[in-house]
Amino acid sequence: MVTPIAMPAKRADRLEFECLLWRRKVALVAGVDEAGRGPLAGPVVAAAVILPAHWLEPGIETQLRDLTDSKQLTEAQRESFFDILSNHPQIRHAIAVVDSKTIDQINILQATHRAMNAALAKLKPAPEHVLVDGRAVKTMRFPQTALIKGDSLSYSIAAASVLAKVTRDRMMLQYEAQFPGYGFARHKGYGTTNHLEALQKMGPCPIHRRSFAPIRQEEPRLF
């Protein structure tokens, strides 16, 4: 169910969407986001984060004030925020992973939604409302508000963005050692020139997404 909420007057306050719900006595507000929709290889990872409702009056803690969309942060900043978020005693979080084989079976959109729903299902207690980055998720069983570019508008979504991004990047570093030669540590599976050249030279490895171009065109058809 998609539940609209009024747009905040001040977009600069990235806790405003949460505060609007907290003032309505909706205490368990989760932000959810994903990392890895676009790459040619590796999993899609989703994270869900619930910030404490008692931050309504004091606002976000100082150590998290610069938290925003993970793509706007340096690697060092993402790692620092990851440590703060994952070890904070008052912040609930969960992470879910959907692998490349499943992505090929059900398509990347459905895989992304599956990862988001799985992350939300791990939260205890369950959220009462979800702030979703991007468009609404039809399969979500919680009331939700979809926010385009939500990772730059909501601290909860930004937190989920960082947890998902860092988790996936760390996985791709491990895949670099397992499948050397593709440069996964550098490009994290995205279709860079070096990655495409490695694909031409070596062909796809087990974590490549066979349903994605150009891998789909390069594999021979069976008659």
Image: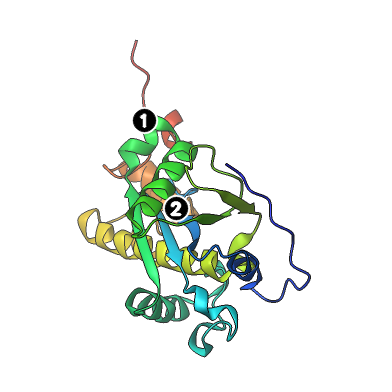
Examine the rendered structure and indicate whether residue 16 appears above or below residue 61.
above
Asked if the residue at tag 1 contacts the one at tag 2, i.e. Cβ–Cβ closer than 8 Å, the answer is no
Q: How many marks?
A: 2
Please state if 17 lies on the left or on the right of 117 as rendered: right
Q: Amino acid at mark 1?
A: Gln
The front one of 120 and 41 is 120
The front one of 77 and 41 is 77
Q: Position of residue 137 (x, y in %)?
A: 54, 42
Q: Position of residue 86 (x, y in %)?
A: 35, 74
Q: What residue is shown at x 33% (from left), y 37% (from top)?
A: 102
Mark 2 to mark 1 CA distance (whole Å) = 16 Å
- According to the picture, the residue beneath numbered tag 2 turns out to be 36
Q: Amino acid at mark 2?
A: Gly
Q: Which mark is residue 105?
A: 1
Q: Secondary structure at mark 2?
A: loop
Q: How is the image coloured?
A: rainbow
**From the image, which quarter does the N terminus lie in?**
top right
The front one of 63 and 109 is 63
